[in-house]
Image: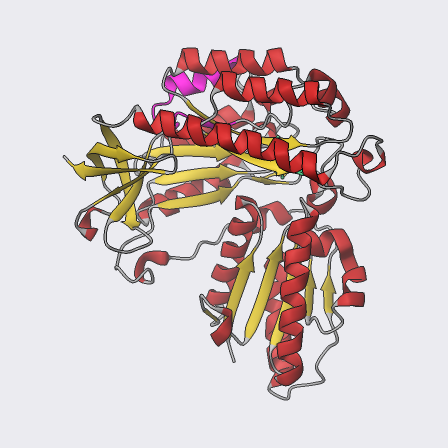
Amino acid sequence: MNRVYIKTYGCQMNERDSEAVAAMLRARGYVIVDTERTADVVLLNTCSVRDQAEQKAIGKALNLAARKRKAPDFVVGVMGCMAQNRGTDLLDRLPDLDLLVGTQKFHQVPDHLDHIMATLRGQGPRPSTIVDLEAEAGSQNTIRDHLDHGHDNGAGARQVTAFISIMQGCNMACTFCIVPKTRGEERSRPIDDIVAEAEQLAARGVRDVTLLGQIVTSYGRREFPFVDGRSPFVQLLERVHAIPGIARIRFTSPHPRGFKDDLVQAFRDLPKLCPNVHLPLQSGSDRILRLMNRPYTRDRYLEIIESLRRAVPEMYFSTDIIVGFPGETEEDFEQTRDIFERVGFDMAYIFKYSVRSGTPAAEMAGAVSTEIKERRNQVLLDLLHIQSLMRNLQLVGRTVEVLVEGPDKVGRRLSGRTAGNRLVHFAGDVRLVGELIDVKIERASAASLVGEVV
Ligand code: SAM
């Protein structure tokens, strides 16, 4: 009765929240399973950024509710952004839910499940849906537990990469975005706590950490002072950089507004900071950027890219783009296509604009048809394919440093990543996991590289 499956929708922040919940549950004696088929409890950790993500999770929850009607002891919960966004309205469609938990209450899930489990063992009446959606001061400090994957990945290989949540919430007011509603105001964890977590991960064998937040470049803005012109975020990078076991540091997502000289300088001065920046652009048209309430212009964006390339010439760039924002004309889209090509993004998440009720953009005129959104989306996907392929082809014949992460999906080879975050497959012994090794690249596709250990 204690096997839990957690299904995660959406971003890395959600993945990290799910991992923390799994670790807390495991510490309470629950078993975390990797398929819903064998689970006694299924928790959906949901995303609200686009309607499609919400519909997928609702579809899955309806499906699980049908299973619950046949097996009443089966437990189903919905957590995270959609729970926060839709609140108890969700119960109109999903009256059978056992648990509805918001984005500031993940740490309460073990107590809630313990309570439900006790009632299934006959200790008291089973509650109707437990609803826990309030804001909670200090909740940003509760996402800190990690699963120790060391023994469960089948190959006996240790965990090499990890996410660390450094803050919660978002104070930006992008007109398209639901996140400020679902995640609340920006709240940052203390630097010392984050560093202690990174040290513990390093002691366990983790070598590559990704610092996570909705807008990481705003980290600690209100809580901690600038020191010698360096923002709290750059101070945090320096502290994590000083941890001996950590070989690589990444972060996501920053905001273009946060790329001041101190952060550009950090890329020059901190060799462990990986040459790979995810810099959400959203649109290449100044007119659309203004409508989106994004506080930069295309020229400023290009300036940031140039300054980072001057600091680290081989820098890799990825981005987020929204096509079909209300009022986006062919000329506006052409501006996006142009900047997409000029920067030569190596990776990108390209989204078709999705109306989020309650956001200012939902009230804007000039809806773009689905067909046009599809076409613009495809134009950028085609460009991305060519750009990624070209960038990967440049590595053929070269020897690159790869951090070995584990057996690849097929299980016949190992895989790892370059500092620039390119996926590499190669033959090798599982004892290499966690090592930084040289791999000579022999073949490339847009998605990955194949090589031989030197
Ligand atoms: N740090 C990021 C930034 O600077 O904007 C925010 C990350 S946001 C949670 C993830 C991405 O989802 C956004 O960058 C945006 O491209 C996309 N997104 C947000 N709202 C959207 C909407 N209504 N429709 C389509 N895509 C959306």
As rendered, which of 331 and 210 lies closer to the eye? 331
- Residue at horizontal 41 percent and vertical 29 percent from the top: 388
Above or below residue 143? Residue 436 is above
262 magenta-colored: yes
Report x, y in % for residue 339: 56, 18
- The picture quadrant for ligand 1 comes to top right
384 magenta-colored: no
Report x, y in % for residue 328: 73, 26
The quadrant of the image that shows the C terminus is: top left
- Residue at horizontal 57 percent and vertical 38 percent from the top: 213
- Residue at horizontal 50 percent and vertical 50 percent from the top: 144
Count the labels in the image.
0
Q: Is residue 238 left or right of residue 114?
A: left
Report x, y in % for residue 333: 66, 23
Above or below residue 30? Residue 294 is above
Question: Farthest residue in the left direction?
Answer: 454
The image quarter containing residue 239 is top left
Question: Would residue 186 be seen by someone viewing this image from the given angle?
Answer: no
As rendered, which of 109 and 138 lies closer to the eye? 109
- Residue at horizontal 17 percent and vertical 47 percent from the top: 428
The image quarter containing residue 367 is top right
Colour logic = secondary structure
Report x, y in % for residue 145: 48, 54
Q: Is residue 389 left or right of residue 46?
A: left
Question: Farthest residue in the bottom direction?
Answer: 122
As rendered, which of 289 and 84 lies closer to the eye? 289
Question: Would residue 383 be seen by someone viewing this image from the given angle?
Answer: yes
Residue span colored magenta: 261-278
Above or below residue 283? Residue 145 is below
